Each structure stands twice: as C-alpha cells, then as structure tokens.
C-alpha cells in the first residue's frame, strides 16, 4: 500500500504495526497535522475511556484482541470509521477496502507493544498537550452507525421520500462537517425564494426531515416593512407547519397532530406577545434555546397554547427570527420522543437557519412593498373603467412586460368630449420602469386636460411635445390622438411617431389607415398633421402600442401585417353582417403573440363605431333674443312628438327653457340647440361665452339662480364643457 495514504489517514484505534510494516513519516511538516498519535503505554496518563456507563465493561486490554465490526469493545465507533461514514469515503488503513484489517486494541486503554515515549505516529499525547486535530468521539446520544448505514443516510434518499429514519437509527448529522454541509445546502435553498411563502417553505423543506421531525414557523402579523415602527402589541401568526408523516401513536405529543397547513383546532394560530412576558424575553434574547431551558418552558405555552405539549428534554429548539432591525417571528424545531435529542452544536445550526430565513423574509417583504407600489402606480395611472359615450363601444387590454415588474410607459384613454364626441388616445413612453410610469402619468394627465379644452388633435400633440420637453431632454414618447364624431360618422387622427391604427370594416376587410407618422413627442420643433377619415357604422378601430407588433423575432411592419390578417380572419368567423364581439376580438388579437414573443408592454384600445342615425338628431340655431326660450320649447315639443316621447314633454320644456334663458342672457351670437335620441334623450345648448355656470343655492330674496337647481333635480345627468369658441351645457333624461 502507498505509504502516503497511510500517513494521511491514520486512526488512533488501529493496532500498532511492526516496525518493518510501519510507514515512514513524511518529510513534509504538514504531515504532523494529519497524524493521530497512538495510545500511550501502560501506566501513562491518557484520555478517559469514551464508554457508556450503562453498558458492559470493555474487554481486557490484551494486545491483539480483535474488535468486531471495526468498533472498539466499548461500543463506540472508531473516529476514522465515523469520519468515513460522515463524508461517504472509506477510512484509510493498512489494508485494502473490503479485507479484514489487523485486530485493534481495546480502545487504547490496555498495554501496548511500544513505549509511551517512542514518538510513533500512533502514540497518544498526554492530557496537558491535547491534539486539536484528533477526531471527536461520537456523541453518546447517537447510536453507532456502520459504514453501510451511513452511506444510506448520506445518499439523500430519505430527503427525497420525506420519510424519517426508523427508530433506533441515528440522525444524519453526526459531525461538524455534516452540519456545515447541511447549513450550506439549507441556506442555499432558503436563498432561492423570492417571496415570503417561498422562503418559509424553503426553511421547512430544508429542515424536515434532515434536521428535525417537524417545524412550526410563526411570523409577526402584520410584518413590519423597512424602518416602520409598528404600533400596538406584537402578534405572532402561525405561518406554516411541516412534519414527517407519522403513523404511530406518540402518547399525545404535539407532533402527530401537525398538519401541512395551520389548523385552529390543533395549535394556536395567533399569539400576542405580552410585554415583559417569558416569550418576549426569549425573543429579545435572539439566541435559540432548548425547550427544557427555564425561559423556554415558560415561553412555549404562551406560543403554542396551554393545552399542548412538546417532547421533553432537548428534543425541541425555540429559535427567534430576527431581521435587520427587529424580531419578526420564531421557529420551533421538534424531534419525536423516540428519536435522539438535539445536541449543543445544533443550537448553532438553528441560529444559522433562523438568521438566513429572517433576513430573507425581510428582503421579501421589502420587495413585495416595492412591487405593490409599482403595481398601484401603474394601475392608478390607467383608467379603471372605460366610459360609455354615445354612439361608440369600447374595450381595452394592458399587459406588462413581465409579471415581476408590472410598470411601464404604455397607456390608453377614452375621454368624452362635447357634442357626444369621444377622444381615443394611446401612447408609449420609452422604457418600462418607475420613471417611465411617472412620465406616462404626467403626459396622460396633460392629454386629459387638453382634451377638456376641445383642442384639435394636432394641437393636443403639440402641447404634449412641449410638456415632454419641460420634463427633461430625454423624455421621449409616441402618441396617437383621435376624435370620433358619432353624428358626422367621421374621425380625425393625429400621430406622433406611433404605429398606425387598423380599421376593421363591417364586411371583414381590415385596413391599415394611412396617417402621417410625425415625430415622437419630446423631439421639439416639429409640426403635427391631422387627417379626417370616414368612420362607418359597424366598423372597429384598433389602437395599440408597438409591443403588440414588434419583438426581437419580427420588425414592426411585419407585425402590423400579421395583425391585419388576424383581424380579417377573426371577422370571417362571425360573417359579413355581424362584427365580432369586442372582448373576444381583443383576446384573439393577443393570441397572435407566441411564447417568448413579447418583451415590451402592450396597451390595446378597440372602439366599435355605432354612430347616431340622422333621424335621431335634431339641430337648430336660435337668435339671442327674448323670444328664444319660447321658440326652443316649441321645437323640442315637435321633436318629441316625432320620436314618440311625449311623456318627456313637460320635463324637457322646463329644462330647455331654463338653459336657453341663461345662454341668451349673456351671449351676442346665435345659440345652438341639439337633441339626440339614443338610449337616453340628450339636450345640448351651446353659446360663445367661456364662463361655465355653477350650481348655487339661491336665497329667498333672489329673483333668479334656480335654473341649474331644477336641472340638477330633474335630469339624469348634466354638465358644462368649455370649448375653444365658448361652452356647451348639456343634460340627459331617461326614456322608456
């Protein structure tokens, strides 16, 4: 056999070899650190025997007496055999693996063949000079383990099946090396979690059954975030439990009752930590403690309830979970009464598990708060619900670039305008970050304000461009702004570097509208051009962002052509006379995206043009004179009679008279009166005075000021909108 191998793997319990067979000590001084001295000679002072008090006495120390199964007569395994079982490698000896080795002396406590001061590498030092590299004997609480049994335990098979070792077999970890490897693997598993549930589950799965037979994890409710200082008492909630499946009766202990999920009938789900109480003191101490410690004995009933017990002795460890600034919970590790108890070194393992878990939970809570803020920011900047303007139906979709970052710069909007018109807006700010979402919110607010002024689409884009330049030099965005008039069946569109819209006609033909592309918002110094196109009844206009048609696999124009073909194919399914439902159409459009074909946000807005038939519209001009209110009443009465809505005559005449009277009192130009019959009866009165009327409570001595009060009481809805040339006051009445 190679002498180097014998030198590197000595054992203190091997029989001293003859001088001819003994290997020569290596010249490398590092070999001294690897050598285990042999037992001292008879009569010299040595370490006490590592036998168990209750066992039979060891065999007499007769030189050459064999020890069965590679163990000392005392029953404790040889250090080299235990180390081999822990690491999964065969112990080095003077014989090949599988052959019968030389007989070993009786634990090194009997007489030996060599004098104590021979300096042999198998000699044992005195008590005053202990060898720090001597392998420690196996703990008395863990039975001996053969090499075959150790290999089964170390193979990890029990972890995969989730079954604990049978009674009487040792726990897997028996040496410091095992504990270090376990802590490394467990912390890596815990660190893989990104949210709270994954981290807690990682802690449970890493410890059961390798370290404990069961675990209970309690966390503060609610969990503090960052530097928050929670007010009120500290409340712990049972977050998760895990255990080895148990079929045997364990005499009413807590473990057989544990379930994968918390159960109020099994253990206390909520626990209030009393200031100055025993549980509070244990949590403040931070360090894990055994259940038989005085502090833990008083704290456990407060944590799990008075009616429940845990296995006695050192078979339970209570470990506080401390985050960066405060204790955020506690973990209770349990072993069955028929299993070996925890050792003192297991407290260090529990401390490492608790520390890594607590820090991971702290980061998960912070990450969850950041994601919540980003999600709320994005959600509040997009419309919660779409309006229901007259003559048009709307549907929308929004998809973030990734579920882990639900923020971006894409937006859509539908804004009702005076005259039953509606503004359709879709835009895209560069990037999909918090900054992009903030810029998007400012541009969307600006667009809503400009739409309220009833500016032409090209003017709206011009003002958005100026606003983007005020926000910063690199604030770039694309935007498409369209205004649909259901009475005229026309749509006016202006574009700022955005992909062109697609119009799906009633017959199933899909058309990419030819709109001047324009420059993106934020470039500055460019003009925007608007075009006016027909918007026939039954047609559908689709506005979208480039995330729908552009990806790393295709360019934007290829995607637009695929979108046009998809719309045409979907329209063929419902026939030439029936347009596809809007919601289903949006879903079909999104289905054109294959797996991995999306790397940007997607905003989608679909508008179905129903329009208002000319027979449902009545329009007049009224001169600003005292007879105008009376003429308005007569015209309104005739229109209601033609539409068969005579039941609304009294209410309509009263409200029209009040609104027209207010208009002709201050204007110098003709007043417009328009009635629209849709699902409601809508009346619009326009003049050239920009001041908007305000609802106020008239005093008893006032002669006027009650007109808008009557409108507010009798109308279904009413409002006033400022125009570039004046204002429009409108109200709606329900009809059968």
Image: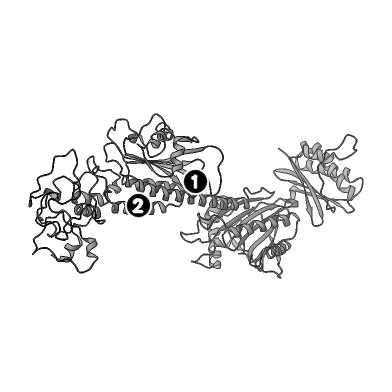
Q: Quadrant of residue 731?
A: top right
Q: Residue at x 52, y 51 (%)?
A: 366
Q: Quadrant of residue 495?
A: bottom right
Where residue 684 appears, as percent x and y from the top left, is 79, 48
Q: Residue 410, which numbered label?
A: none
Residue annotated with mark 1: 326
In depth, the one of 564 and 66 nearer the eye is 66
Compared across the picture, whether 184 is left or right of 655 comes to left
Q: Which quadrant: the C terminus?
A: top right
Vertical relation: 700 (above or below) 602? above
Where residue 62 appears, as percent x and y from the top left, is 7, 49
In depth, the one of 490 and 89 nearer the eye is 89
Q: Residue at x 90, y 38 (%)?
A: 703
In depth, the one of 455 and 68 nearer the eye is 68
> Label 1: few (<14), some or many (≥20) within 10 Å?
some
> Label 2: few (<14), some or many (≥20) within 10 Å?
many
Q: Residue 183, which numbered label?
A: 2
Quick one: SS at disc 1? loop
Is residue 417 visible in the rendered structure shown here?
yes
Compared across the picture, whether 587 is left or right of 73 comes to right
* Label whose residue precedes the other's in the sequence (2 or 1): 2
Q: CA distance from mark 2 to mark 1?
A: 23 Å
């Amino acid at each position: 056999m190679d002498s180097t191998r014998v030198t590197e793997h000595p054992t203190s319990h091997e029989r001293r070899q003859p001088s001819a067979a003994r290997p020569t000590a290596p010249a490398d001084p590092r070999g001294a650190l690897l050598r285990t001295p042999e037992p001292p000679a008879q009569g010299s002072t040595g370490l006490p025997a590592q036998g168990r008090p209750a066992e039979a006495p060891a065999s007499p120390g007769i030189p050459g007496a064999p020890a069965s199964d590679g163990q000392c007569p005392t029953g404790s395994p040889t250090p080299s055999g235990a180390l081999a079982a822990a690491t999964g490698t065969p112990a080095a000896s003077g014989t090949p693996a599988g052959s019968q080795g030389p007989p070993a002396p009786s634990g090194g406590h009997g007489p030996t063949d060599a004098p104590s001061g021979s300096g042999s590498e198998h000699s044992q030092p005195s008590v005053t000079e202990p060898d720090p590299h001597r392998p420690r004997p196996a703990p008395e609480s863990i039975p001996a383990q053969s090499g075959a049994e150790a290999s089964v335990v170390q193979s990890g098979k029990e972890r995969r099946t989730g079954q604990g070792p049978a009674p009487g077999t040792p726990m897997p970890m028996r040496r410091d090396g095992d504990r270090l490897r376990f802590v490394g693997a467990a912390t890596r598993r815990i660190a893989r979690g990104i949210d709270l549930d994954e981290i807690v589950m990682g802690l449970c799965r890493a410890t059961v059954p390798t370290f404990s037979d069961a675990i209970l994890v309690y966390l503060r409710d609610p969990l503090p975030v960052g530097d928050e200082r929670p007010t009120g008492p500290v409340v712990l909630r049972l977050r998760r439990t895990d255990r080895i499946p148990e079929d045997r009766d364990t005499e009413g202990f807590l473990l057989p009752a544990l379930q994968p999920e918390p159960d109020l009938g099994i253990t206390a789900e909520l626990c209030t930590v009393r200031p100055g109480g025993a549980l509070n003191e244990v949590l403040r101490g931070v360090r894990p403690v055994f259940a038989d410690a005085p502090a833990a004995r008083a704290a456990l009933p407060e944590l799990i309830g008075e009616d429940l017990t845990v296995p006695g002795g050192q078979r339970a460890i209570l470990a506080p979970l401390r985050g960066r600034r405060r204790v955020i919970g506690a973990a209770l590790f349990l072993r069955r009464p028929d299993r070996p108890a925890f050792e003192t070194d297991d407290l260090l393992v529990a401390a490492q598990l608790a520390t890594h878990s607590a820090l991971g939970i702290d980061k998960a809570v912070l990450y969850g708060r950041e994601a919540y803020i980003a999600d709320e920011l994005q959600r509040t900047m997009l419309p919660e619900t779409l309006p229901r303007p007259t003559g048009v139906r709307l549907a929308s979709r929004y998809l973030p670039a990734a579920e882990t970052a639900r923020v971006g710069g894409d937006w859509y909007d539908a804004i009702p305008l005076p005259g039953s018109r509606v503004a359709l807006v879709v835009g895209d700010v560069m990037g999909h970050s918090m900054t992009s979402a903030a810029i998007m919110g400012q541009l969307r607010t600006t667009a809503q304000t400009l739409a309220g002024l009833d500016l032409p689409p090209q003017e709206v884009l011009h003002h958005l461009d100026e606003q983007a330049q005020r926000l910063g030099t690199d604030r770039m965005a694309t935007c498409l702004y369209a205004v649909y008039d259901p009475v005229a069946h026309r749509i006016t569109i202006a574009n700022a570097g955005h992909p062109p819209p697609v119009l799906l006609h009633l017959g199933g033909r899909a058309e990419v509208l030819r709109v001047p592309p324009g420059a993106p918002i934020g470039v500055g110094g460019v003009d925007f051009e608007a075009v006016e196109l027909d918007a026939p009844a039954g047609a559908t206009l689709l506005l979208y962002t480039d995330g729908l048609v552009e990806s790393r696999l295709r360019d934007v124009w290829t995607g637009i052509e695929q979108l046009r073909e998809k719309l045409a194919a979907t329209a063929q399914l419902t026939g030439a006379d029936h347009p596809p439902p809007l919601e289903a159409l949006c879903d079909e459009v999104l289905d054109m995206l294959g797996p991995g074909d999306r790397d940007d946000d997607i905003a989608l807005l679909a508008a179905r043009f129903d329009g208002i038939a000319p027979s449902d519209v009545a329009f007049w001009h009224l001169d600003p004179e005292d007879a105008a209110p009376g003429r308005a009443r007569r015209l309104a009465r005739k229109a209601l009679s033609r539409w068969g809505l005579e039941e609304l005559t009294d209410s309509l005449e009263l409200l029209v008279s009040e609104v027209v009277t207010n208009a002709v009192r201050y204007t110098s130009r003709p007043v417009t009166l328009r009635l629209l019959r849709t699902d409601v009866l809508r009346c619009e009165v326009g003049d050239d005075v920009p001041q908007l009327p305000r609802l106020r409570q008239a005093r008893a001595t006032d002669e006027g000021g009650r007109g808008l009060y009557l409108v507010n009481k009798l109308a279904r809805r009413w409002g006033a909108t400022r125009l570039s040339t004046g204002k429009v006051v409108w109200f709606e009445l329900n009809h059968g």
